[in-house]
Image: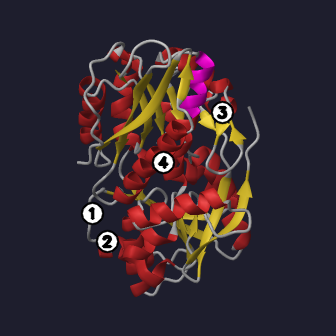
């Protein structure tokens, strides 16, 4: 477990998860931002990078003068716990963050199963939550305190899958594989529908248990069907790389897709050269002409800290901190319910560059989804290359 320890203060207003220092005009206080993230297992690099980006945004905001509400200045502090990417640990982390740490703002949460466990408490206890979870079942008017900090299948797959289909019109058949949990099941449901619209024949759509370490039997079953495309959906990098390595050893040479693929480094760690050509929907490149000095520096710092380049999952934890700053200042309050009321209407700094806000009325019945670019990437010569970028419209 990784815990970002917070200093112990005697607090006025501790009900808001705020640690006070000096009361009165120009007082400075701490707002804890809880993080429910995988810090061990196959999703650990996602979690460690997410914690890094929360701290990066918090540091930038604190150094620039903090968050202003009336005469009080607040600084952010990130408090991260390991949810091990499962519902049981997600429940334990939720209870720790809310009941022991007194957190009233979740700066980010990762994994649909642990997020559902967390959300079951946050909505009842009046805690505002940001999440990367892909499930549509956690958003909508029934969950007014929940906001999504990265693109989900509803945003990514309608762009990614048609692009791949157009790039490989010769590919006529498909096999799919996803983790057997809420994240994988909801990802598969969306992907299945989008692939069917392309006319590609789906030969199989299977699931595997998280924690699996032996992928040879799974890869052998996939290869035996001789699909033109294999889509590894919501698999984390370590697992997807292992499957691709086994497929390569079996001689399968078709089109490779990892819908939630976030970068080359994580896949290469277990897949080696077998990951060449993989298409992904959650990767971000930092070597193009439009990349800013700030983006390059933060990415270089992240690589030094976590061993791989940043991706869309981790960037969401940076964007959520800036969104919270904008929401708190717009609401003129640190009451999560008041901040959540104004959040759909605020704009804020995004790590992608510029200012963004929220949308999602068409898909979810409420504006709880950050309006982020959908980026299609592919691994070419061992490096991640941006193939297309779409900024979504809609309400």
Q: Is residue 167 at least partly visible in the picture?
A: yes
From which residue to which does the magenta span run?
323-331
Q: Is residue 123 above or below residue 382?
A: above
Labels 2 and 4: the sequence-earlier one: 4
Residue for point 67% across, 40% down? 371
Pointers 1 and 4 in contact (CB under 8 A)? no
Which label number is shown at residue 246?
Answer: none
Tell me if 337 is positioned left or right of 104 in this view: right
Q: Marks 3 and 2, how far apart in space? A: 37 Å
Residue for badge 1: 212
Pair 4/3: label in front: 4
Residue for badge 3: 360
Give the quarter of the image for residue 104. Answer: top left
Q: Marks 4 and 3, how far apart in space? A: 27 Å
Magenta stretch containing residue 44, yes or no? Answer: no
Give the quarter of the image for residue 172. Answer: bottom right
Q: Marks 1 and 4, how far apart in space? A: 33 Å
Q: Marks 2 and 1, how far apart in space? A: 7 Å
Q: Secondary structure at mark 3?
A: loop
* Magenta span: chief secondary structure: helix
Count of numbered circles in the view: 4
Residue for badge 2: 215
Residue for badge 4: 56
């Amino acid at each position: 477990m990784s815990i970002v320890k917070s200093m112990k203060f005697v607090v006025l207003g501790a009900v808001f998860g705020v640690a006070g220092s000096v009361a009165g005009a120009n007082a400075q206080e701490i707002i804890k931002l809880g993080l429910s993230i995988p810090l061990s297992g196959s999703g650990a690099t996602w979690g460690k990078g997410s914690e890094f980006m929360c701290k990066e945004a918090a540091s930038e905001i604190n150094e620039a003068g903090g968050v202003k509400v009336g005469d009080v200045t607040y600084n952010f502090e990130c408090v991260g716990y390991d949810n091990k990417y499962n519902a049981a640990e997600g429940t334990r982390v939720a209870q720790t963050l809310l009941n022991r740490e007194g957190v009233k703002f979740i700066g980010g949460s990762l994994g649909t199963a642990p997020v559902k466990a967390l959300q079951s408490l946050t909505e009842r206890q009046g805690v505002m939550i940001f999440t990367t979870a892909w499930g549509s079942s956690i958003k909508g008017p029934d969950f007014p305190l929940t906001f999504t900090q990265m693109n989900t299948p509803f945003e990514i797959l309608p762009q990614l899958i048609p692009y791949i289909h157009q790039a490989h019109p010769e590919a006529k058949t498909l096999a799919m594989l996803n983790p057997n949990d809420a994240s994988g099941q909801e990802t598969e449901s969306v992907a299945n529908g989008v692939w069917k619209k392309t006319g590609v024949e789906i030969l199989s759509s299977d699931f595997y248990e998280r924690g699996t370490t032996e992928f040879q039997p799974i890869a052998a079953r996939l290869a035996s069907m001789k699909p033109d495309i294999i889509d590894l959906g919501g698999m984390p990098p370590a697992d997807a790389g292992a499957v691709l390595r086994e497929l390569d050893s079996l001689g399968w040479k078709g089109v490779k897709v990892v819908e939630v693929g976030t970068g080359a480094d994580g896949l290469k760690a277990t897949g080696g050269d077998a990951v060449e050509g993989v298409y992904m929907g959650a990767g971000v490149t930092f070597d193009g002409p439009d990349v800013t000095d700030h983006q390059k520096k933060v990415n270089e710092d992240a690589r030094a800290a976590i061993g791989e380049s940043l991706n869309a999952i981790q960037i969401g934890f940076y964007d959520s901190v800036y969104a919270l700053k904008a929401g708190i200042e717009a609401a003129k309050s640190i009451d999560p319910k008041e901040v959540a009321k104004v959040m759909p209407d605020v704009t804020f700094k995004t790590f992608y560059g510029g200012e963004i806000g929220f949308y999602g009325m068409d898909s979810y019945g409420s504006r709880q989804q950050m309006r982020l670019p959908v980026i299609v990437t592919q691994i070419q010569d061992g490096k991640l290359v941006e193939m297309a970028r779409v900024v979504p419209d809609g309400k």
